[in-house]
Image (cartoon, rainbow, N blue to C red):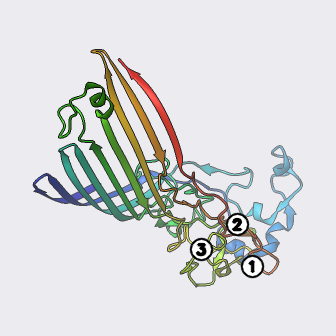
Amino acid sequence: QQWNASLQHQIGEWLIDATYAANKGNHFAAAGYNLSQVKPEVRQQLGQSLFDPLPNPYAGKIPGGLGASTVTRERTLMLFPHYNGVSVDNPRLGNYLSHQLQLNVRRQFSSGLLLLFTYTAGKKTSDSQQIPVNFGGPQGQFEIEGALEIGFQDGLYNRAVNKSIDPADVSQRTVISALYELPFGRGKPWSPANVVLQKLVSGWQVNTIGVMQTGIPLVVRGANNNAANRPDSTGQSARLDHPTRQRWFNTDVFVNPPPFVLGNVGRVLPDVRTPGTVNLDLSLLKDTRLGERYTLQFRAEAFNFLNHVNLGAPNTSFGAGPAGKNVNANFATINAARDARVAQFALKLIF
């Protein structure tokens, strides 16, 4: 379901559009689960005794290890103990909801100048790995990498625990673009009489596009206790007021859950995200007519023109030590960044 409301107003050459947009989806393909598994509370209660050998009621009746003389206690408690597993793939149990403010300000092309400003703010929540709509802006060099989910906790008995901010959510995004034709040459405010000079100064155009956006939520995994891959939280926020590349979030708030207990950390961290992105691309173009048929185009382009350091995603792999605390030295550190300034030049013959 989709619904929206917008308000538009034009002031001279400027068009302003403010829109509230919402998008809701239910019964989409979601992460699968094993239908033949022991309930989490039973596994927690039995603990290590789950691995005790017991006589196998299917001994000699089925091939392989499942037909051995003994099997584990856990195997005898499964709904289908004579199968390795019964996978339910892509169940129609996925849900998502997005609310957004979309602000667009556009200056119509006039006097050689075109300006466009867009700002998007909102939140997308979901409980599935396969959401069919991308609300984070176009994919490409501005998109933060790392929106990967690892595992789907308790997908059979308690899917509601997986509802969270979507791992690919971008809460705020601003794009500013401009095109300006320099006022030189034939038909422009300044047109030299000399033909050679007119060729040199005509056809110049400057383009720029700037993108600023917040990062995406962090997905922390790595628990090891025969039940979970999500660690436990001490109840404190992992957010730091002044994060650094060496310590992007507080690792002390994560501990390994007790044996056979599912971790209580959410599908994503609610208040810690990857570093944001600030990027400005700049290009200079010149079209030169060569007779009636040919046009020679010169292009000079600079990506990340300001050479801003855009850090990559931090390491989110919790490593459980003997005391339950993290022992992964790379946990919460950032060891990569996006490209620095890149410049390129090109000539193109158009006919």
Residue at 59% across, 61% down: 313
Q: In what element is the residue under mark 1?
A: loop
Label 2 and label 3: CA atoms lie apart by 11 Å
Choose between 326 and 267: the one closer to the eye: 326
User: Which of disc 1 and disc 2 is earlier in sequence?
Assistant: 2
* Place of residue 242 in the rendered image (x, y in percent of width and height, measured from the top left): 56, 79
Q: In what element is the residue under mark 3?
A: loop
Quadrant position of residue 47: bottom right
Check disc 2: other Cα within 10 Å, few if <14, some if 14-19, many if 20+: some
Residue at 74% across, 75% down: 326
Residue at 60% across, 65% down: 154
* Quarter the C terminus occupies: top left
Residue under label 1, please give it. 325
Label 2 and label 1: CA atoms lie apart by 11 Å
User: Which of disc 3 and disc 1 is earlier in sequence?
Assistant: 3
Residue at 38% across, 50% down: 209
Q: Do tag 2 and tag 3 residues touch (Cβ < 8 Å)? A: no
Residue under label 2, please give it. 222
Instruction: Name the side, left or right, on which 7 lies relative to 131.
Output: left
| Residue 265 disc label | 3
Q: In what element is the residue under mark 2?
A: loop
| Circle 3: residue type | Val
Q: Do tag 2 and tag 1 residues touch (Cβ < 8 Å)? A: no
User: Which of disc 3 and disc 2 is earlier in sequence?
Assistant: 2
Quadrant position of residue 227: bottom right
